[in-house]
Image: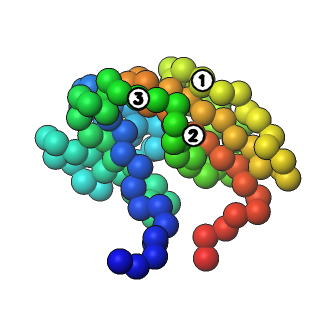
Amino acid sequence: MGQLLGLRSVIYGVSNLAEASDWYQQLLETEPYFNSEMYVGFNVGGFELGLNPDARSVTSRADGVVAYWGVDDIAAQVERINALGARQHSEITDVGGGVLMSAFLDPDGNIFGLIQNPHFCIE
């Protein structure tokens, strides 16, 4: 096997695929590129945010790995996501060097992370 190629997909377990798809369409301000009865996928800046109605994912959640999605203005996005009714999981935190992070719980309790990192750019 070869090297890891980088992030491709972050998949969130959801209890109601249609409701979750509607919520994420509002959050991401885009339609899914893939939409079936078993899976919904969104293209977010060249990476995939997937929704999967897998009951195991919904009931066995833990604060282990959190995917952080890049933003240019974290304060504006935190305000917008709060207005969508998400529950804030962590406040905006400066982790050093001007890198800001925050996280929310989506309607199914998945952790949705945001990061504003002025040092990272996709080549």
Quarter occupied by residue 103: top right
User: Mark on residue 61?
Assistant: 3
Within-10-Å neighbours for mark 1: few <14, some 14–19, many 20+: some
The mark closer to the camera, 2 or 3, is 3
Q: In this view, which residue lies farthest toward the right?
A: 97
Q: Earlier in the sequence, mark 1 or mark 2?
A: 1
Between 93 and 23, the one nearer to me in the picture:
93
**Which residue is painted at 69% across and 41% down in the image?**
101
Visible in this render: residue 83? no
Q: Gap in Å between the C-alphas at discs 1 and 2? A: 10 Å
Between 25 and 88, the one nearer to me in the picture:
88
Mark 2 residue type: Gly
Q: Secondary structure at mark 1?
A: strand
Q: Secondary structure at mark 2?
A: strand
Q: Is residue 42 above or below residue 61?
A: below
Within-10-Å neighbours for mark 2: few <14, some 14–19, many 20+: some
Mark 1 residue type: Gln
Q: Earlier in the sequence, mark 3 or mark 1?
A: 3
Q: Is residue 114 above or below residue 60?
A: below
Residue 4 image point, x, y percent: 46, 70
Between 66 and 15, the one nearer to me in the picture:
66
| Residue linked to disc 1 | 88
**Which residue is painted at 31% across and 41% down in the image?**
51
**Which residue is painted at 40% across and 29% down in the image?**
61
Q: Gap in Å between the C-alphas at discs 2 and 3? A: 15 Å
Question: Contact (CB < 8 A) between labels 2 and 3?
Answer: no
